[in-house]
Image (spheres, rainbow, N blue to C red):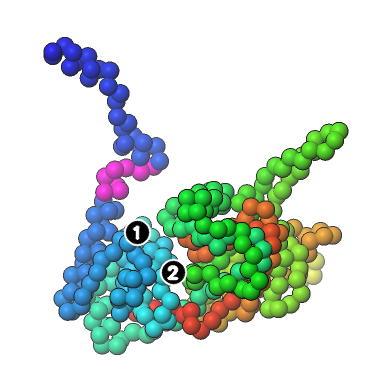
Amino acid sequence: MEHKRRERAEKRPSLPDHNACLALKGSSYNGLLERHNMHTHNVRHIVDNLQKQGMEVRVVKRGEYDEDTVRWADAIVSAGGDGTMLLVASKVFDKNKPVIGVNTDPERSEGHLCLPVHYTHAFSEALRKLRKGDFRWQWRQRIRVHLEGRGINPTPVDLHEQQLSLEQHTKAHRITTNSQHRRTHETYTSPSLLPVRGLNEVFIGESLSSRVKYKSFKPHLTLSLHRASYYEISIDDGPWEKQKSSGLSVCTGTGSKAWSYNINKLVEQTVEDVLEIGKRKTGLDIPLCEEVIRSVTEAYNEALVFSPEENQVFFSVREPIVNRVFSNSRQRGFANKVCVRSRCWDACMVVDGGTSFEFNDGAIATISLHEEDLLKTVLLD
Protein backbone atom coordinates (compact mmCIF):
# COMPACT_ATOMS: atom_id res chain seq x y z
CA MET A 1 0.00 0.00 0.00
CA GLU A 2 2.82 2.38 0.84
CA HIS A 3 4.45 1.63 -2.51
CA LYS A 4 1.20 2.38 -4.40
CA ARG A 5 0.70 5.66 -2.53
CA ARG A 6 4.25 6.71 -3.38
CA GLU A 7 3.68 5.79 -7.02
CA ARG A 8 0.49 7.87 -7.20
CA ALA A 9 2.25 10.81 -5.60
CA GLU A 10 5.00 10.66 -8.20
CA LYS A 11 2.46 10.70 -11.05
CA ARG A 12 0.50 13.65 -9.60
CA PRO A 13 1.29 16.82 -11.60
CA SER A 14 3.17 19.43 -9.63
CA LEU A 15 1.41 22.70 -8.80
CA PRO A 16 2.77 25.85 -10.41
CA ASP A 17 5.13 27.95 -8.34
CA HIS A 18 3.04 31.09 -7.87
CA ASN A 19 5.97 33.02 -6.46
CA ALA A 20 7.95 32.22 -9.60
CA CYS A 21 5.05 33.34 -11.81
CA LEU A 22 4.76 36.61 -9.88
CA ALA A 23 8.54 37.11 -10.07
CA LEU A 24 8.38 36.89 -13.86
CA LYS A 25 5.95 39.82 -13.73
CA GLY A 26 8.27 41.80 -11.47
CA SER A 27 6.13 41.20 -8.40
CA SER A 28 6.05 38.92 -5.37
CA TYR A 29 3.53 37.34 -3.02
CA ASN A 30 5.03 39.08 0.02
CA GLY A 31 4.88 42.44 -1.75
CA LEU A 32 1.24 41.97 -2.70
CA LEU A 33 0.39 40.84 0.83
CA GLU A 34 2.10 43.90 2.25
CA ARG A 35 0.08 46.20 -0.03
CA HIS A 36 -3.15 44.38 0.92
CA ASN A 37 -2.39 44.65 4.63
CA MET A 38 -1.59 48.35 4.31
CA HIS A 39 -4.88 49.01 2.49
CA THR A 40 -6.86 46.96 5.03
CA HIS A 41 -5.21 48.73 7.96
CA ASN A 42 -5.96 52.18 6.53
CA VAL A 43 -9.59 51.27 5.80
CA ARG A 44 -9.95 50.13 9.41
CA HIS A 45 -8.40 53.42 10.55
CA ILE A 46 -11.01 55.38 8.57
CA VAL A 47 -13.93 53.28 9.87
CA ASP A 48 -12.79 53.46 13.50
CA ASN A 49 -12.53 57.24 13.42
CA LEU A 50 -15.95 57.63 11.81
CA GLN A 51 -17.56 55.35 14.37
CA LYS A 52 -15.89 57.24 17.23
CA GLN A 53 -17.76 60.31 16.00
CA GLY A 54 -21.05 58.42 16.35
CA MET A 55 -21.55 57.82 12.64
CA GLU A 56 -23.15 54.72 11.17
CA VAL A 57 -20.79 53.18 8.63
CA ARG A 58 -21.26 50.60 5.91
CA VAL A 59 -18.14 49.11 4.34
CA VAL A 60 -18.85 47.85 0.83
CA LYS A 61 -16.42 46.27 -1.60
CA ARG A 62 -16.14 47.23 -5.23
CA GLY A 63 -18.57 44.57 -6.48
CA GLU A 64 -21.14 45.44 -3.78
CA TYR A 65 -21.19 49.19 -4.43
CA ASP A 66 -24.50 50.10 -6.08
CA GLU A 67 -27.21 52.76 -6.30
CA ASP A 68 -28.95 51.48 -3.14
CA THR A 69 -25.78 52.06 -1.11
CA VAL A 70 -25.48 55.57 -2.54
CA ARG A 71 -29.10 56.39 -1.63
CA TRP A 72 -28.56 55.11 1.95
CA ALA A 73 -25.49 57.25 2.61
CA ASP A 74 -25.39 60.93 3.62
CA ALA A 75 -21.76 61.06 2.45
CA ILE A 76 -19.42 58.61 0.77
CA VAL A 77 -15.77 57.96 1.55
CA SER A 78 -13.73 56.40 -1.24
CA ALA A 79 -10.93 54.25 0.21
CA GLY A 80 -8.33 53.44 -2.42
CA GLY A 81 -6.75 55.56 -5.16
CA ASP A 82 -7.94 57.66 -8.07
CA GLY A 83 -9.43 54.62 -9.82
CA THR A 84 -11.59 53.88 -6.80
CA MET A 85 -12.64 57.52 -6.59
CA LEU A 86 -13.72 57.47 -10.25
CA LEU A 87 -15.77 54.32 -9.67
CA VAL A 88 -17.40 55.81 -6.57
CA ALA A 89 -18.26 59.06 -8.37
CA SER A 90 -19.78 57.21 -11.33
CA LYS A 91 -22.80 56.13 -9.26
CA VAL A 92 -23.42 59.44 -7.45
CA PHE A 93 -26.03 61.58 -9.23
CA ASP A 94 -27.08 63.82 -6.32
CA LYS A 95 -24.91 66.93 -6.53
CA ASN A 96 -25.53 67.62 -2.82
CA LYS A 97 -24.07 64.30 -1.65
CA PRO A 98 -20.39 64.75 -0.68
CA VAL A 99 -17.73 62.33 -1.87
CA ILE A 100 -14.39 62.25 -0.02
CA GLY A 101 -11.41 60.30 -1.31
CA VAL A 102 -8.74 58.82 0.99
CA ASN A 103 -5.60 57.33 -0.52
CA THR A 104 -5.08 54.01 1.30
CA ASP A 105 -1.79 53.20 -0.44
CA PRO A 106 0.04 56.54 -0.71
CA GLU A 107 3.43 54.92 -1.31
CA ARG A 108 2.31 53.39 -4.59
CA SER A 109 -0.32 55.79 -5.98
CA GLU A 110 -0.43 59.57 -6.29
CA GLY A 111 -4.13 59.99 -5.56
CA HIS A 112 -4.75 63.44 -7.10
CA LEU A 113 -8.49 63.10 -6.43
CA CYS A 114 -8.01 62.17 -2.78
CA LEU A 115 -7.24 64.17 0.36
CA PRO A 116 -3.55 65.03 0.86
CA VAL A 117 -1.67 61.87 1.88
CA HIS A 118 -1.03 63.32 5.35
CA TYR A 119 -4.63 62.48 6.23
CA THR A 120 -4.28 58.80 5.31
CA HIS A 121 -2.71 58.13 8.70
CA ALA A 122 -4.37 61.08 10.44
CA PHE A 123 -7.98 60.78 9.37
CA SER A 124 -9.15 61.97 12.78
CA GLU A 125 -7.51 65.32 12.01
CA ALA A 126 -9.44 65.51 8.73
CA LEU A 127 -12.69 64.81 10.61
CA ARG A 128 -11.95 67.55 13.14
CA LYS A 129 -11.47 70.05 10.32
CA LEU A 130 -14.67 68.91 8.64
CA ARG A 131 -16.66 69.30 11.87
CA LYS A 132 -15.19 72.77 12.44
CA GLY A 133 -15.91 73.82 8.87
CA ASP A 134 -12.20 74.32 8.25
CA PHE A 135 -12.36 73.25 4.61
CA ARG A 136 -13.76 74.29 1.24
CA TRP A 137 -16.32 72.55 -0.95
CA GLN A 138 -15.15 71.92 -4.47
CA TRP A 139 -17.84 71.34 -7.08
CA ARG A 140 -16.15 69.33 -9.81
CA GLN A 141 -17.65 69.49 -13.29
CA ARG A 142 -18.61 66.18 -14.90
CA ILE A 143 -19.27 65.25 -18.52
CA ARG A 144 -22.61 63.89 -19.67
CA VAL A 145 -23.10 62.11 -22.98
CA HIS A 146 -26.23 61.88 -25.14
CA LEU A 147 -26.33 59.22 -27.85
CA GLU A 148 -28.56 59.22 -30.92
CA GLY A 149 -28.61 57.82 -34.43
CA ARG A 150 -28.49 54.29 -35.75
CA GLY A 151 -26.39 51.26 -34.88
CA ILE A 152 -26.25 52.09 -31.17
CA ASN A 153 -25.64 49.43 -28.52
CA PRO A 154 -26.70 50.90 -25.14
CA THR A 155 -25.15 48.06 -23.11
CA PRO A 156 -22.21 49.36 -21.04
CA VAL A 157 -19.20 47.23 -20.15
CA ASP A 158 -17.55 47.83 -16.76
CA LEU A 159 -13.78 47.99 -17.25
CA HIS A 160 -12.60 49.20 -13.84
CA GLU A 161 -9.34 47.55 -12.79
CA GLN A 162 -9.36 45.25 -15.82
CA GLN A 163 -6.74 47.19 -17.81
CA LEU A 164 -8.25 46.08 -21.14
CA SER A 165 -7.03 47.22 -24.51
CA LEU A 166 -9.56 48.79 -26.87
CA GLU A 167 -9.61 45.54 -28.83
CA GLN A 168 -10.49 43.66 -25.64
CA HIS A 169 -13.17 46.30 -24.90
CA THR A 170 -14.94 45.31 -28.10
CA LYS A 171 -14.75 41.60 -27.27
CA ALA A 172 -16.11 42.34 -23.80
CA HIS A 173 -19.05 44.20 -25.37
CA ARG A 174 -19.95 41.17 -27.48
CA ILE A 175 -19.68 38.78 -24.51
CA THR A 176 -21.77 41.07 -22.27
CA THR A 177 -24.43 41.61 -24.90
CA ASN A 178 -24.76 37.91 -25.75
CA SER A 179 -24.78 36.72 -22.14
CA GLN A 180 -27.44 39.20 -21.04
CA HIS A 181 -29.63 38.69 -24.14
CA ARG A 182 -30.28 42.38 -24.53
CA ARG A 183 -31.42 44.19 -27.64
CA THR A 184 -28.52 45.72 -29.48
CA HIS A 185 -27.90 48.11 -32.34
CA GLU A 186 -31.06 50.11 -31.89
CA THR A 187 -31.97 53.39 -33.59
CA TYR A 188 -32.54 56.43 -31.35
CA THR A 189 -34.43 59.23 -33.10
CA SER A 190 -33.93 61.56 -30.11
CA PRO A 191 -30.88 61.92 -27.84
CA SER A 192 -30.67 59.32 -25.05
CA LEU A 193 -28.73 60.24 -21.89
CA LEU A 194 -26.14 57.59 -20.92
CA PRO A 195 -26.28 56.42 -17.26
CA VAL A 196 -22.71 57.56 -16.46
CA ARG A 197 -20.94 60.86 -15.85
CA GLY A 198 -17.30 61.49 -16.73
CA LEU A 199 -15.25 63.03 -13.94
CA ASN A 200 -11.98 62.85 -15.92
CA GLU A 201 -12.61 62.33 -19.62
CA VAL A 202 -14.38 60.61 -22.49
CA PHE A 203 -12.21 58.93 -25.12
CA ILE A 204 -13.39 57.78 -28.56
CA GLY A 205 -11.33 55.57 -30.84
CA GLU A 206 -11.12 52.45 -33.00
CA SER A 207 -10.29 49.20 -31.24
CA LEU A 208 -7.10 48.84 -33.27
CA SER A 209 -5.07 51.83 -34.39
CA SER A 210 -3.65 49.70 -37.20
CA ARG A 211 -5.26 46.69 -38.80
CA VAL A 212 -5.28 44.87 -42.10
CA LYS A 213 -8.51 44.49 -44.08
CA TYR A 214 -8.85 42.05 -46.93
CA LYS A 215 -11.16 42.80 -49.84
CA SER A 216 -11.75 40.32 -52.61
CA PHE A 217 -12.14 41.67 -56.13
CA LYS A 218 -12.02 39.62 -59.29
CA PRO A 219 -9.56 38.77 -60.67
CA HIS A 220 -7.25 39.57 -57.73
CA LEU A 221 -7.18 40.18 -53.98
CA THR A 222 -6.43 43.62 -52.63
CA LEU A 223 -5.18 44.41 -49.16
CA SER A 224 -5.80 47.77 -47.48
CA LEU A 225 -4.63 49.25 -44.20
CA HIS A 226 -6.98 50.93 -41.77
CA ARG A 227 -4.79 52.99 -39.48
CA ALA A 228 -7.03 55.49 -37.72
CA SER A 229 -10.44 56.39 -36.35
CA TYR A 230 -12.76 58.02 -38.89
CA TYR A 231 -15.39 60.42 -37.54
CA GLU A 232 -16.95 63.84 -37.98
CA ILE A 233 -16.71 66.48 -35.28
CA SER A 234 -18.52 69.72 -34.49
CA ILE A 235 -17.30 72.16 -31.83
CA ASP A 236 -19.89 74.42 -30.15
CA ASP A 237 -22.48 73.83 -32.90
CA GLY A 238 -19.97 74.81 -35.58
CA PRO A 239 -19.63 73.12 -38.99
CA TRP A 240 -19.02 69.38 -39.18
CA GLU A 241 -15.46 68.42 -40.09
CA LYS A 242 -14.30 65.03 -41.38
CA GLN A 243 -11.37 63.71 -39.41
CA LYS A 244 -9.07 60.76 -39.13
CA SER A 245 -6.87 60.38 -36.08
CA SER A 246 -5.77 57.88 -33.46
CA GLY A 247 -8.64 59.00 -31.24
CA LEU A 248 -10.43 61.91 -29.59
CA SER A 249 -10.24 62.88 -25.90
CA VAL A 250 -12.63 65.31 -24.19
CA CYS A 251 -11.75 66.13 -20.57
CA THR A 252 -12.91 68.23 -17.62
CA GLY A 253 -10.66 70.42 -15.47
CA THR A 254 -10.25 67.42 -13.17
CA GLY A 255 -9.05 65.31 -16.09
CA SER A 256 -6.78 68.05 -17.46
CA LYS A 257 -4.02 66.75 -15.17
CA ALA A 258 -4.46 63.16 -16.34
CA TRP A 259 -4.50 61.56 -19.80
CA SER A 260 -5.23 64.81 -21.65
CA TYR A 261 -2.13 66.42 -20.14
CA ASN A 262 0.09 63.58 -21.29
CA ILE A 263 -1.41 63.66 -24.80
CA ASN A 264 -0.59 67.35 -25.25
CA LYS A 265 2.42 68.18 -23.08
CA LEU A 266 5.74 69.21 -24.63
CA VAL A 267 9.19 68.06 -23.56
CA GLU A 268 12.18 70.38 -23.35
CA GLN A 269 13.85 68.80 -26.38
CA THR A 270 10.88 69.77 -28.61
CA VAL A 271 10.79 73.31 -27.25
CA GLU A 272 14.52 73.71 -27.83
CA ASP A 273 14.14 72.55 -31.46
CA VAL A 274 11.27 74.99 -32.09
CA LEU A 275 13.13 77.91 -30.52
CA GLU A 276 16.19 77.09 -32.60
CA ILE A 277 14.10 77.18 -35.80
CA GLY A 278 12.48 80.43 -34.68
CA LYS A 279 15.89 81.96 -34.07
CA ARG A 280 17.11 81.03 -37.56
CA LYS A 281 13.93 82.13 -39.33
CA THR A 282 13.54 85.49 -37.59
CA GLY A 283 17.14 86.42 -36.90
CA LEU A 284 16.13 87.31 -33.36
CA ASP A 285 18.58 86.77 -30.55
CA ILE A 286 16.55 84.11 -28.71
CA PRO A 287 18.56 82.75 -25.78
CA LEU A 288 18.65 78.96 -25.86
CA CYS A 289 19.94 78.46 -22.35
CA GLU A 290 18.54 75.72 -20.12
CA GLU A 291 16.61 78.19 -17.95
CA VAL A 292 14.70 79.73 -20.89
CA ILE A 293 13.88 76.35 -22.43
CA ARG A 294 12.59 75.05 -19.10
CA SER A 295 10.55 78.21 -18.50
CA VAL A 296 8.87 78.07 -21.93
CA THR A 297 8.15 74.33 -21.55
CA GLU A 298 6.58 74.83 -18.12
CA ALA A 299 4.48 77.79 -19.30
CA TYR A 300 3.07 75.79 -22.22
CA ASN A 301 2.32 72.70 -20.13
CA GLU A 302 0.76 74.71 -17.30
CA ALA A 303 -1.69 76.25 -19.79
CA LEU A 304 -3.08 72.76 -20.44
CA VAL A 305 -4.34 72.49 -16.84
CA PHE A 306 -7.50 74.27 -15.69
CA SER A 307 -9.75 74.29 -12.64
CA PRO A 308 -12.05 71.31 -11.95
CA GLU A 309 -14.81 73.87 -11.34
CA GLU A 310 -14.45 75.60 -14.71
CA ASN A 311 -17.54 75.25 -16.88
CA GLN A 312 -15.84 74.04 -20.07
CA VAL A 313 -14.22 70.96 -21.56
CA PHE A 314 -10.92 70.54 -23.37
CA PHE A 315 -10.82 68.41 -26.52
CA SER A 316 -7.69 66.80 -27.98
CA VAL A 317 -7.39 65.15 -31.39
CA ARG A 318 -4.61 62.60 -31.17
CA GLU A 319 -2.25 62.35 -34.16
CA PRO A 320 -4.59 63.85 -36.79
CA ILE A 321 -4.25 62.92 -40.45
CA VAL A 322 -4.50 65.97 -42.73
CA ASN A 323 -4.83 65.63 -46.50
CA ARG A 324 -7.17 66.50 -49.37
CA VAL A 325 -10.09 64.62 -47.77
CA PHE A 326 -9.53 65.03 -44.05
CA SER A 327 -8.97 68.37 -42.35
CA ASN A 328 -8.03 69.45 -38.86
CA SER A 329 -8.65 73.13 -38.25
CA ARG A 330 -8.16 72.75 -34.48
CA GLN A 331 -6.19 69.94 -32.90
CA ARG A 332 -7.05 70.98 -29.37
CA GLY A 333 -8.98 73.66 -27.53
CA PHE A 334 -11.68 74.60 -25.04
CA ALA A 335 -15.37 74.12 -25.80
CA ASN A 336 -18.81 74.09 -24.21
CA LYS A 337 -20.11 71.26 -26.38
CA VAL A 338 -18.50 68.64 -28.61
CA CYS A 339 -20.53 66.54 -31.07
CA VAL A 340 -19.04 63.46 -32.73
CA ARG A 341 -20.57 61.37 -35.52
CA SER A 342 -18.94 57.95 -35.82
CA ARG A 343 -17.79 56.57 -39.16
CA CYS A 344 -15.88 53.79 -37.41
CA TRP A 345 -16.31 50.05 -37.81
CA ASP A 346 -15.07 48.76 -34.47
CA ALA A 347 -14.89 51.67 -32.04
CA CYS A 348 -15.52 52.29 -28.36
CA MET A 349 -16.44 55.32 -26.29
CA VAL A 350 -14.77 54.94 -22.89
CA VAL A 351 -15.80 57.08 -19.90
CA ASP A 352 -13.14 57.59 -17.20
CA GLY A 353 -11.34 54.46 -18.37
CA GLY A 354 -13.99 52.44 -16.55
CA THR A 355 -17.17 52.22 -18.63
CA SER A 356 -17.19 51.45 -22.34
CA PHE A 357 -19.88 51.75 -25.01
CA GLU A 358 -19.82 50.67 -28.63
CA PHE A 359 -19.55 53.67 -30.90
CA ASN A 360 -19.77 52.61 -34.54
CA ASP A 361 -20.97 54.02 -37.85
CA GLY A 362 -24.17 56.04 -37.49
CA ALA A 363 -23.89 56.84 -33.78
CA ILE A 364 -23.80 60.50 -32.72
CA ALA A 365 -22.48 61.56 -29.29
CA THR A 366 -23.12 64.97 -27.76
CA ILE A 367 -20.66 65.74 -24.97
CA SER A 368 -21.50 68.62 -22.61
CA LEU A 369 -21.59 69.88 -19.01
CA HIS A 370 -24.64 70.54 -16.85
CA GLU A 371 -24.97 72.04 -13.38
CA GLU A 372 -26.99 69.10 -12.01
CA ASP A 373 -24.05 66.76 -12.75
CA LEU A 374 -21.60 68.53 -10.41
CA LEU A 375 -19.73 66.33 -7.92
CA LYS A 376 -19.44 67.71 -4.38
CA THR A 377 -15.94 67.10 -2.99
CA VAL A 378 -13.78 68.45 -0.17
CA LEU A 379 -10.59 70.53 -0.22
CA LEU A 380 -8.34 70.42 2.84
CA ASP A 381 -4.99 72.16 3.18
The answer to whether residue 324 is left or right of residue 82 is: right
Amino acid, disc 1: Gly
Find numbered disc 2 in the image and state the secondary structure of the residue it sits on. Answer: helix
Q: Say which label, 1 or 2, has the lower sequence index.
A: 1
Residue found at x 79% / y 38%: 216
Question: Between 69 and 10, which is closer to the camera in this rendering?
Answer: 69
Label for residue 21? none
Q: Give the labeled residue for mark 1.
A: 63
The answer to whether residue 370 is left or right of residue 80 is: right
The answer to whether residue 88 is left or right of residue 233 is: left
Magenta part of the protein: which range?
26-33
Residue found at x 62% / y 49%: 208
Residue found at x 19% / y 16%: 6
The spot of residue 247 in percent (x, y) is: 64, 59
Task: Give the number of marks.
Answer: 2
The answer to whether residue 252 is left or right of residue 136 is: right
Q: Give the labeled residue for mark 2.
A: 90
245 is higher (above) or lower (below) than 215? below
Asked whether the viewer can see residue 330, the reply is yes
Give residue 290's quadrant in the image.
bottom right
Find numbered disc 1 in the image and state the secondary structure of the residue it sits on. Answer: helix
